Amino acid sequence: MLVWKKIKNRRRQGINSSLALPTAALSACLALFLSASGSAADDVDVFTFDDRPLSEPLEHPDWFKRSFLDLPHDLEEAVAAGKQGIMVYFGQRRCAYCYKLIEVNFGLADIVEYTRRHFDLIPVDIWGVDELTAMDGAVRTERDFALAKNTTFTPSILFYDRDGQEALRLRGFYPPYQFRAALEYVADGHYKRESFRDYLARGDGRMVFEPEDLNEEDFFTQPPFNLDRSRLAGKRPLAVFFEQGDCHACDVLHGEALREMAIYRDFEQLDNVQLDMWSDTKIITPAGERTTARKWAEDLGLFYAPSILFFDEKGEEILRVDSVVRFFRLRSVLNYLMSKAYLTEPSYQLWRVSHSDQGP
């Protein structure tokens, strides 16, 4: 069983406070303990980095599988070697988030050892033109396969189990403790019994925090939260921030990215709501359904805080940012929103092709 750490930070001490890595009070049923073979890569602040495109193309670790991009065959080989399945990694050569995955997560010996023991990892270039055979036997280019799998943000990883079924999807870069949990969630078969959100919550010993633990912004709409756009369309897009207390990543978002004037002004041009993703706050969703913040987050499959979901004027989801996000990526998303490009090009991924300056 892989062991994983939970990074904890108290926001009351501010963004620049040092990271603490105490032993987490994890549930007995998960039996998760701190790794004795930790690395310095665990101690870096993975939420603060320059996310502009890399100046030099990224090189994959030599232990990534040299695949002919025949996924059914790759899976057969993995199962024959006694592994639990395969991981299909969707990346870009100049993606700063892909670099963080390789530098930080795959810079940890325990993560590399566990990944190689349980999975074969097959890299896919989301703009590649090489032919790929998918699990259903369909043959298409790497790029078309990436588009079909909605790999909006790189790095994205699809986990396929021994039967060729998708067990979990990660879209974007996640800190080591969540990445470790994802590996164990699939390798130990937890995906057959519960959602990744529930698995993380049990291991986290999720506490309930008071509303004042959340960061505040002047552009947030105050309750009651009637977000219904199914009957009367809104006048502008809607951004829903799902956050939680005791969340260092949330602190960084509010203390850094949202402090950039251009980003802040763009959000001022949207309707914005902040929800505690573990609370029982009553809401009416953009689709007109009555529920709670906790139940809605569960239905949406959210497990990462902060997550920002964007909805159009009629209440349809445009896209979501539910992994680590920095200045460059967030500006690109907002450019897509503010230009109303979603009205003519519903695929953010394809829009980026014609706007190469928007980056990864």
Image (cartoon, rainbow, N blue to C red):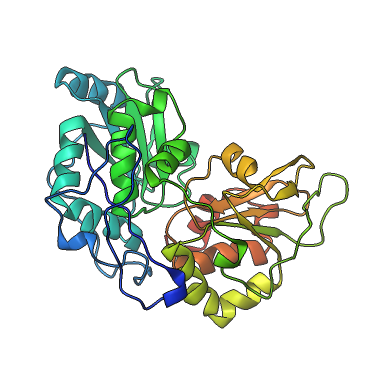
Q: Position of residue 81 (x, y in %)?
A: 14, 22
Residue 252 sits in quarter: bottom left
| Image point (48%, 49%), residue name | 152
| Image point (30%, 68%), residue name | 19
Q: Position of residue 346 (x, y in %)?
A: 63, 48
Query: How many marks overall?
Result: 0
Q: Position of residue 240 (x, y in %)?
A: 64, 57
Using the image, determine if residue 95 lies above or below residue 138: below
Which quadrant of the rendered structure holds the N terminus?
A: top left
Which quadrant of the rendered structure holds the C terminus?
A: bottom left
Report the residue that reaches farthest toward the bottom: 261
Residue 144 seen in the figure: no
The one of 99 and 117 positioned closer to us in this rendering: 117
Using the image, determine if residue 323 lies above or below residue 329: above
Using the image, determine if residue 223 lies above or below residue 76: below
- Left or right of 198, for residue 288: right
Report the residue that reaches farthest toward the right: 232
- Left or right of 14, for residue 87: left
Q: Position of residue 344 (x, y in %)?
A: 68, 52
Residue 30 sits in quarter: top left
Residue 180 seen in the figure: yes
| Image point (71%, 66%), residue name | 270
The one of 330 and 246 positioned closer to us in this rendering: 246
Using the image, determine if residue 308 lies above or below residue 27: below
The one of 208 and 179 positioned closer to us in this rendering: 208
- Left or right of 262, for residue 136: left
